[in-house]
Image (cartoon, helix red, strand yellow):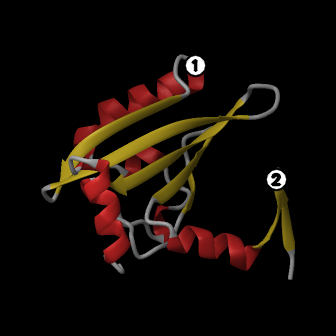
Amino acid sequence: MTEINLKGGQLTRKQLNTIFETIPQEFDFIDENDIVRWSSANRHRIFKRTDDDLGKHVLEVHPGHSEGRVKQVLHDMHSGDRDSISITIIHHDKPINISFYALRDDDNNYVGCVEVTQDVSNHQQRGSLWRNIKQMFNKK
């Protein structure tokens, strides 16, 4: 098996795919030209991505009503004014957190950003003790 060398160790392609198929967050990588180059493919996806979305400008895969906000995030990431932003929206009556993280190389050049999306319904319960107890008994 081919191993992929990363800072911190090596993973096989199978291991790396399994990580992104398993964790309940969805990831989208947008390159320095704002083109969608990769999306995690897992059963937890809230906003579906297909192979047809790859190679498209990020604005083409977001709903029209969010265009202004997405443009502002990208501008701030490119310019270095912001390295991350996290927003919460309501989607199908559930709170959804969407975070964008600017990616920079060792010379601080912008190489793109990663968009991380997750349902945060479980994170909004009062009292971490109660949430932790529920997690111990919830087998999902």
Q: Quadrant of residue 118?
A: bottom left
- Disc nearer the start of the sequence (2/1): 2
Most foreground residue, 127 or 6? 127
Q: Quadrant of the N terminus?
A: bottom right
Most foreground residue, 117 or 72? 117
Report helix, strand or loop for mark 2: loop
Q: Which mark is residue 79?
A: 1
The residue positioned 22% from the left and 40% from the top of the image is 65
| The residue positioned farthest toward the left in the image shown | 93
Q: Quadrant of residue 13?
A: bottom right
Relative to 4, 93 lies left or right: left
Q: Amino acid at mark 1?
A: Ser
Relative to 9, 79 lies left or right: left
Q: Is residue 14 above or below residue 105?
A: below
The location of residue 20, given as percent across then percent down, is 57, 68
The residue positioned 47% from the left and 73% from the top of the image is 42
Q: Which residue is mark 2?
A: 8
